[in-house]
Image (cartoon, rainbow, N blue to C red):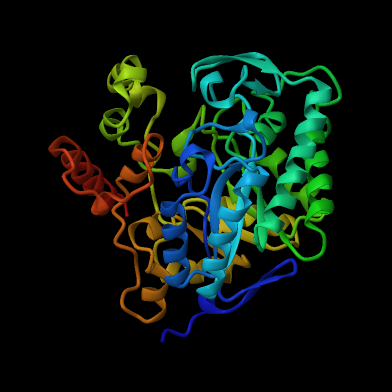
Amino acid sequence: MVDSPVFSPVRIGPVTLRNRVIRSAAFENMAYGNSPSRDLYDYHTAVARGGVGMTTLAYASVSRSGLSFDGQLWMRPEIVPGLRQITDAVHAEGARVSIQLGHCGNMTHRSTCGCTPVGASSGFNLYSPTFVRGLKVAEIKQIVKDFGNAVCLAREAGFDCVEIHAGHGYLISQFLSPYTNRRRDAYGGPLENRMRFMREVMEEVMRAAGSDMGLMVKMNMHDGFRRGMQTRECLEVAKELERLGAHALVLSAGFVSKAPMEVMRGAMPLRTLSHYMDPAKFWWLKVFVRLFGRSIIPTRPWSEGYFLDEAKLFRAAVKMPLIYVGGLVSLAKMEEVLEEGFQGLQVARALIRDTDFVKHLQDGTYKCSACGHSNYCIGRMYTLEMRCHTCVKDMPKSLEKEVESLERLGADRV
């Protein structure tokens, strides 16, 4: 067995993990009908069996209005038994289990969320595309309560930790960012006001989490474009989250509706993305993506540990535990991140490629993931369940060629 600090225990608030590796909240698209499924159960159980310290169920919405996808979890009492089956199975494998809670804000459509999409401010969102209505104060207060209720349901379902999604251009991030928050009331204007919604959510979820659940927050270190939040303001957000009592921060970056590859890096596999779109619903979008996709979703070069240099600024600014996410595929880079003072390591694509990734690192089978960074899993997950291309049978030749091309490009940049 490999002796490494990566495999040493770590605490997140009141919860102890057997090692430092956490399956990050990369969207699975396996909650068919917004409810737990056998696919979701099998995947997270396999990841737990494969050796992670904790696995995270991704992007569960706190309310119907916060749904982006039909395959996304919607927190409500009737799904608690199904979630409990997943948490019990993960615990039986010796791992802890977390759930990411959020609200998509303006990144949805009426057909999915059941209402006119809402956000920090009114406007038009090209992501759907759809018109968006700014939230009224009373509605903001209700969504705050929805976050607290979702944490209570997570406890009932057996989760050890919750991760509040305050990044990537979803609703909390929409309030934080001057790009999407043009309000003139107490929730808009200077950063102190733009943090108000986040502050109210945190106070509510901290009460709901109590003394026995770990509470993490995923936040941006920057939005990824000129009119968005920059590192200076994000450092202030981190300090405020520390003051509010979060047990750990997950440091990310990017805005899904404006700078998606800032989050994930590399190139979006546009042929894959358009191929899986339903032609009956999105024929026009398929054509648009093929013709103009590269201009609206530009490539961002991938390199291992691509957020680390910026994350060090946050490590110097706060004393609380920090969890690094962003391009971790090797044991050596994981050890380097821990040496820089980070407490946890979030991994996604390496665990999509191989659910036994951590076990193989620990037993010395290999030192680095075989993930080729084609991002096929990302191009596919917006329409179908998350899969690595190595797990897909009878893939069209055109998609095979795209994967091969992007993997060659990724290998040149490593």
Q: As rendered, which of 400 and 335 lies closer to the eye?
A: 400
Q: Residue at x 46, y 73 (%)?
A: 51
Instruction: From the viewer's perspective, tell me whether residue 210 is left or right of residue 98.
Output: right
Measured along the vertical axis of the image, is residue 203 above or below residue 346?
Answer: above
Percent from the top left, x then y, of residue 205? 78, 48
Which quadrant does the C terminus fall into?
Answer: bottom left
Where, by quadrant of the figure, is residue 384 drawn? Answer: top left
Percent from the top left, x then y, of residue 322? 65, 60
Q: Residue at x 44, y 37 (%)?
A: 261
Instruction: From the viewer's perspective, tell me whether residue 327 is left or right of residue 394.
Output: right
Measured along the vertical axis of the image, is residue 157 above or below residue 26?
Answer: below
Percent from the top left, x then y, of residue 410? 29, 48
Q: As rendered, which of 224 and 34 lies closer to the eye?
A: 34
Instruction: From the viewer's perspective, tell me whether residue 161 is left or right of residue 408.
Output: right
Number of marks = 0
Q: Is residue 91 visible?
A: yes
Where, by quadrant of the figure, is residue 309 drawn? Answer: bottom right
Q: Residue at x 82, y 31 (%)?
A: 141
Q: Residue furthest left?
A: 397
Q: As rendered, which of 314 and 52 lies closer to the eye?
A: 52
Which quadrant does the N terminus fall into?
Answer: bottom left
Percent from the top left, x then y, of residue 38? 43, 54
Measured along the vertical axis of the image, is residue 247 above or below residue 254?
Answer: below
Instruction: From the viewer's perspective, tell me whether residue 362 is left or right of residue 353.
Output: right
Q: Is residue 236 visible?
A: no
